Amino acid sequence: MTQTVPKTMKAAVMHNTREIKIETLPVPEISHDEVLIKVMAVGICGSDLHYYTNGRIGNYVVEKPFILGHECAGEIAAVGSSVDQFKVGDRVAVEPGVTCGRCDACKEGRYNLCPDVQFLATPPVDGAFVQYIKIRQDFVFAIPDSLSYEDAALIEPFSVGIHAAMRTKLQPGSTIAIMGMGPVGLMAVAAAKAFGAGTIIVTDLEPLRLNAAKKLGATHAINIREQDALEEIKNITDDRGVDVAWETAGNPAALQSALASVRRGGKLAIVGLPAQNEIPLNVPFIADNEIDIYGIFRYANTYPKGIEFLASGIVDTEHLVTDRYSLTQTQEAMERALQFKNECLKVMVYPNELS
């Protein structure tokens, strides 16, 4: 199978905070070990919104016209001379962080900690709100025909939950509390269900997100506007606390609540990144109860499992994509995701749809 690849493509380029323009750029030229992907779907992530509104996340600063988007999937449009795993026309999910493969972290299998990672939509690396991207073949994964491009794009946030499950050694039948039902939190619910958690307790402010979490497998949903999360978790677990808690919102109060919800000898995973660097935590509680605390940074070795889980139908993601936009509507899509968190879950952009 062959495809005619154009010389130029359309791209949604951020020129300033909350200012995106559609431009014509050259289609990337691939090297011998890379594939060119016609991008079919890109999910908008919280980090995209952060760059869009603030122009930076921590030390990563947008200093030039910049392309957002990293949760993506598409179709192979061309392959490099040494590519042996893919052919033109293959449907694929894209793992957006290409690592060096040589450092200690990479050699240990913890390549998410590679200091030289080139991660889509993390300055200065441009992202996937474009018609074509290139990427090294070992960060591309074939998807079955039964899996939609939208679901394949969702494997990126799903991977964060899978990584948290693996780091905290989540066991079948476990009780887990997940604080914050943004897109990463919702996919964390899906991961907890896929790993066989028995009781999945979730907290959030928005009824839409709590209802979505129930459809994904949450057994208990707590609206923290109306109920005390800690009190409810104690009631649900007969005052024992949960085996594992994941904080996915990046909210200091939620992190403190997550810690307090864990049973003696239990585990806490910090997934969400708060705006401030330092948050007071109850150190005597951590020590007295031997709480294991895990930092979660992206993911490693999760994509095959993510594809397997979503393709199996164990998780129903059909209701997660609430809003769909063409590439020319990228700014509108970003504004929708930014301003209507009470109405939308995952906003998806389709780069090869222009109107």
Image (tube, helix red, strand yellow):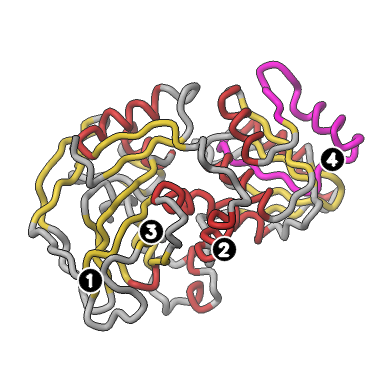
Vertical side of 98 occupied by 184: above or below: above
**Of marks 3 and 1, which one's residue comes earlier in the chain?**
1
What distance separates the C-alpha of mark 2 from that of mark 1? 28 Å
Assign the N terminus to one quadrant of the image.
bottom left
Q: Amino acid at mark 1?
A: Met
Q: Is residue 304 part of the magenta span, yes or no? A: no
Q: Is mark 3 in CB contact (under 8 Å) with mark 1?
A: no
The magenta region covers 221-250
- Res. 241 mark: 4
Q: Looking at the picture, how far across and down is residue 30, in whole percent? A: 20, 70
Q: Secondary structure at mark 2?
A: helix
**Of marks 1 and 4, which one's residue comes earlier in the chain?**
1
Q: Which residue is mark 3?
A: 96
Vertical side of 32 occupied by 197: above or below: above
Q: Is residue 224 part of the magenta span, yes or no? A: yes
What distance separates the C-alpha of mark 3 from that of mark 4? 36 Å
Drawn side of residue 308 relative to residue 54, left or right: right
**Of marks 3 and 4, which one's residue comes earlier in the chain?**
3
Q: Looking at the picture, how far across and down is residue 198, in whole percent? A: 79, 47
User: Viewer-nearest of labels 2 and 1?
Assistant: 1
Q: Amino acid at mark 4?
A: Gly
Using a 10 Å C-alpha cutoff, classify the residue at mark 2 as few (fewer than 14 neighbours), some (14 to 19) or many (20 or more).
some
